[in-house]
Amino acid sequence: MRRPPDGGGQRRDEVDLRYISTRGRAPALGFKEALLVGLADDDGLYVPETWPTFTPDEIRAFRGLPYAEVAFRVIGAFVDGEIADDTLHAMIDEAYATFAHPAVVPLVQSGPNTWLLELFHGPTIAFKDVAMQILARLMDHVLTERGERLTIVGATSGDTGGAALEAFKACEGIDIFFMYPEGKVSDVQRRQMTTIGSANAHALAIDGTFDDCQDMVKAMFANTSFRDRVQLSAVNSINWGRVMAQTVYYFTAAASLGAPERAPTFVVPTGNFGDIFAGYVARRAGLPIERLVIATNENDILSRTLATGHYTMADVRATITPSMDIQISSNFERLLFEAVGRDAASVAELLGKLRSEGGYALPAAARDYVATVFDAGSSDQTQTRETIARVFAESGYVADPHTAVAIRVAEAHARGTAPVIVLATAHPAKFPDTVQAATGAVPALPPWATQRADNPETIERLPNEREAVEAFIAARTRVAAGGDAR
Ligand SMILES: *Cc1c(COP(=O)(O)O)cnc(C)c1O
């Protein structure tokens, strides 16, 4: 791994870190390429060929450091020299200066041996800011260096779109368009997308459902002439850069509670498995972690998989924790790859069964491996509402519904003496109706999120028609007609 100049020691490896696909049929790439392509050519996901590791001394040295400094050391190990240290450090400083709290991701004690890791002090008050803010800067840096541009298109049911538009609004080389279902996102979420006031960041209100928006994104990627014309790209949760950025807070939180001497348990409200997989990456990179606990709502495919050994799809149910209403947890493929001993052919076969038969059985050895690290539990909507109300009554702490799912699961899993850290993924003001119903009070937007309150909204209303949306995007992207040569 690569160390910062003052980290002591030499580089251990001669070869630069490469990224390989979980399905084994795409070329191995360096960090920058893996960052820009997102999904591998063979539909697999990129993972580091070898895990960089931090020694106990290096982890101990994280205690008391500013978040951005730890981020530089952790992210630096994965970038592995492809970006100059001072440039990378400056990007990281800038990314986390957008957070309102001086600790960036403060730990709040909630019980004798339990803590909440508040990941929502960024511009759009949910944890996706942590990854998006640095991802945007990394991507823009690589593109600018190459004199290239691209167009990002995405669909959002609320959280991702705001975090992405906010993070990419100042990018020189990127135009970004996010579709959302008109009338089906909350006022807070809509305003976060429509008041940005930057010429390259577009919120498109589609006359349709979230699934319609998502289908249009897929259709645009399948339309090769459009895809090449605008240099289409995505920033979904499978992008390695997002997972990488999320590993940092596992290190900072564990170190401040006594790692490497004490190994905490993390409880993570999970949808696409990106956030909790980042915890697994931290563990592979040397961080002592007791257990990683998957917390789900009624869409509990992951807890069912751990309990039964079968990954079986069911219909998605709409809940009060919309960011976890997911049936195919894309990043689970990365864990599967590890669990089958990095046998890419097995991964490809199992994922093929998911598509053709709607599910697959985890091989016994893989199931055992997963159980050595992970636990899982779920909380239904009644339990989640009850948890918000009870936590508020007991301590005055106002938890958002996603966080409450994890608090509930953490209570059910409390055992041993390991410190328990629950990831708090959204500010309660992002989900005011549910929180008000449970606590009796409307959670106020924090001051840093109200700054744009008077900005006018720019809403582009478009029909649920791919041609119309493509024409809108093609007319506005700064990618030159004919596409840049990539
Ligand atoms: C996205 C999101 C999650 C789920 O994270 P994954 O990485 O998809 O598992 C949980 N809570 C909130 C508030 C989110 O926005």
Image (cartoon, grey):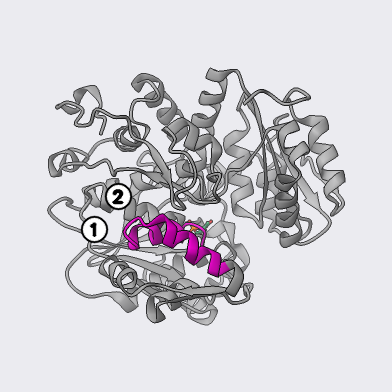
Compared with 195, 480 (above or below) is above
The image shows residue 165 at horizontal and vertical percentages of 63, 40
Tell which circle, 2 or 1, labels the residue nearer the N-terminal end.
2
The front one of 71 and 329 is: 329
Kind of residue sitting beneath label 2: Ala
Say which residue appears at 33% left-offset and 55% top-offset. Answer: 280
Picture coordinates of residue 286 (x, y %)?
21, 48
Residue indicated by mark 2: 282
Relative to 421, say whether 5 is above or below: above
Query: Mark 2 falls on what kind of element?
Result: helix
Mark 1, secondary structure of its residue: loop
Q: Which residue is mark 1?
A: 289
Q: Residues within 10 Å of mark 1 (few under 14, many from 20)?
A: many
What label does residue 343 carry, if any?
A: none
Indicate left or right for 386 with 158 as reference. Answer: left
Per the rendered image, the range of residues in magenta is 328-354
Q: Quadrant of residue 322?
A: bottom right
